[in-house]
Amino acid sequence: MKKNNLIVSFLLVMVLISLSACGSGSTTTSSKTTPAPTTADTAAKASEAPKKKSSYLIGMSQANLGEPWRVAMNDQIAAAAAKHPELKVVYADAAQDNSKQIADVENFIQQKIDLLIISPNEAKPLTAVVKKAYDAGIPVIVLDRKVEGDAYTMYIGGNNKLIGKKAGEYVAKILGDKGGNVVEVKGLEGATPQQERHDGFMEGIKSNPNVKVIASQNGDWLKDKSITVMESILQANKKIDIVYGHNDPAAEGAFIAAKNAKRETEMKFIGIDALPTPDGGIKAVMEGRLTATYVYPTGGKDAIDNAIKILENGEKVEKSITLDTLEVTKENAADVYKQFGGK
Ligand code: FRU
């Protein structure tokens, strides 16, 4: 009986040992069905979250670097991007040529840029290639001039209609009840600010029926072209009271033409842009060549701020951001110059 008891106890211990061995075996099995996360697994999970990269390539397609305002835009982009060492910006200059700008964007798409910033020369011709980039999954920030439709991530720019309206109201006010003859030196035909600055201006002068637009021609945003355009307008019109230039180079070009014809004191000149630089519009107001100009921010810094939101934070940005303007006359020009960091 004693011996039997011993055998039973021995068998019991053996069963317990083998059960515990089974137990450890089952742990191994269960660890196979629910594996503990490995480094490789963690990396795989991270790739499902918004893609964070150690560096980003941004393509900046500029309409025409031959204009001071656009040089300022690129400079502001570069300065803002320099604060983010992980951003690399590559620039292309279309030199006011739509087909060159289309090729520039095509080239960026092939380079597999992470984001496109574009200030399109003209709206219609650039619409398809902007859509192509957007459809390829590249976030697109359209700056200052628009494209048609809405195949882009966001638009950033000033309110050109409002600026035109303010200029029109200012002209209506300074001409008073007597009214007067106005010449308009417009921008480039297919660029959206051209139409918007014209439409806004016409609305602004409406309150004064004696304000007459006697000539309206395209200076294509360029000072030299605006000189030529103004020369023929001066010959055809014996009395001009105001020249409304769609940008400061247009107004300055018109001033040069009038001065060459010894008629610059006969009329006042109004522009748009107000760059805080020695040869910009604010100084031109301070020095008396222009009577007024309107701040038209380039949006360069805003573009980079939003690029960061899109690329690094995976944020959904606003479809359209409107930048502020300011009327600059001799009353506030010196202050505005300082306020905008002019040197
Ligand atoms: C430069 C420029 C600016 C103007 C803007 C309008 O190309 O003509 O002077 O404000 O473009 O898009």
Image (cartoon, grey):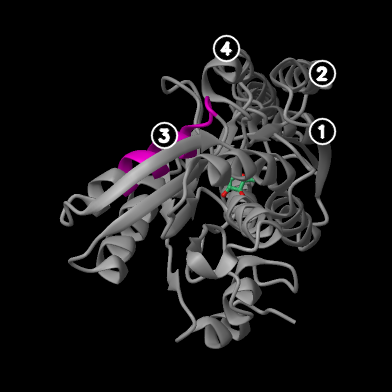
Residue 41 in the image: state x and y as whole percent. 71, 29
The tag earlier along the polypeptide, 3 or 1, is 1
| Residue type, label 4 | Ala
The image quadrant that residue 265 belongs to is bottom right
Kindly report the distance in space between the C-alpha atoms of the residues bearing marks 2 and 3: 30 Å
**Is 75 part of what is drawn in magenta?**
no
Residue 255 in the image: state x and y as whole percent. 62, 59
Residue 320 in the image: state x and y as whole percent. 41, 42
Q: Residue at x 33, y 48 (%)?
A: 201
Callout 4 secondary element: helix
| Residue type, label 3 | Gln
Callout 1 secondary element: strand
Q: Which residues are magenta?
A: 189-201
| Residue type, label 2 | Asn
Disc 1 vs disc 2: Cβ atoms closer than 8 Å? yes
The tag earlier along the polypeptide, 4 or 3, is 4
Q: Specify whether 5 is left or right of 317.
A: right
